[in-house]
Image (tube, rainbow, N blue to C red):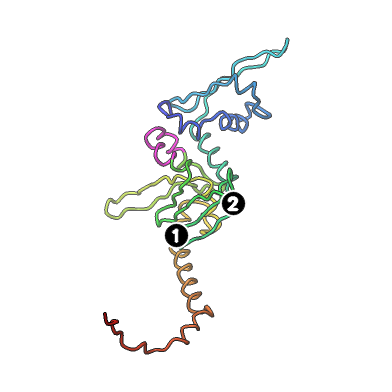
Amino acid sequence: MYNISSALASQTMSKNMVWKCLTVLGKVTGKLTYSISNRMIVEGWGVGVRVVIKRGYKGIQVLKGLSTIISPIKIARQIMEQNFLKSVGLNIIRRSEKVFLVDSRQDPDTKHVVTAHPDGLTCSCMKYKCFKNRMEEEAPILLKALGEVRLLDNQKVCKTEFYDLKKRDIEEKVHIQCHHIRAVMEEYFDAFTAQEYIFNWKKVISNYKQNQDSWVSTEPWQQDFEFFPEEWGEFKRKPK
């Protein structure tokens, strides 16, 4: 993660994100204050994220410092933890069989477009685009770590695996997720992992098509067509 851009770093190794990781690891307690933030240095290293909190002074009191490295898997777990938390309670509108509009937490008037493809979901939000466009090149070790994040039952949250008969090998894919994608996965596809989503995709899409066909055929306004004659007569061009 030593070659990471500022855009990706702000989404993956911000001071707030790092502080949450340190809290989970038991290295710090309480909230991140302005004073601590000013004394904090965060750097991307090849083996993870190096965090330094310089020693400070408050009157005659000496504030302890800290120096540690947070592994990519710890960062990945915190990213997914935030996605789980932020996805709760988001309003979702289904516009078509594959397109969903999801509320933005920053601005309720803004909608993000989540599209459900057979092999995964995409989102129009800046966070997803940043992850998708930058992570593989700038932070491949973090992308790999995301694929290893697991639920309590040991299922991998973001990775899918299938056996390729032609290559005679197991193909793996790590699926980038944001909290908008998480919300659609859980509410509409009854999926907590990328693998469950792919298994459920065809059924959910097929059910939507059937419901739409049923709605069209049973709507009362369809009866209005009975007022129009079956024979419309011959069309004749108006003479000039």
Circle 2 packing at 10 Å, graded few (<14), some (14-19), many (20+), is some
Q: Nearer the viewer, residue 42 or 123?
A: 123
Three-letter code, disc 1: Lys
**Residue on which the image places disc 2:** 90
13 shown above or below 40: below
Q: In the picture, which quadrant includes the N terminus? A: top left
Q: Is residue 113 magenta?
A: no
Q: Residue at x 31, y 84 (%)?
A: 235
98 shown above or below 6: below
Question: x, y (%) of residue 51?
Answer: 54, 23
Question: x, y (%) of residue 165?
Answer: 30, 55
Q: CA distance from mark 1 to mark 2?
A: 18 Å
Q: Residue at x 49, y 76 (%)?
A: 214
Residue at the extreme right: 60
Q: Is residue 144 magenta?
A: yes
Q: In the picture, which quadrant includes the C terminus? A: bottom left
Which type of secondary structure does the marked residue at label 1 adopt?
loop
Circle 1 packing at 10 Å, graded few (<14), some (14-19), many (20+), is some
* Stretch in magenta: 130-145
Q: Are marks 1 and 2 in contact (CB under 8 Å)?
A: no
- Name the side, left or right, on which 213 lies relative to 53: left
Residue at the extreme front: 240
Q: Residue at x 58, y 31 (%)?
A: 16
Three-letter code, disc 2: Leu
67 shown above or below 13: above
First in sequence: mark 1 or mark 2? 2
Which type of secondary structure does the marked residue at label 2 adopt?
loop
Question: x, y (%) of residue 43?
Answer: 49, 23
**Residue on which the image places disc 1:** 98
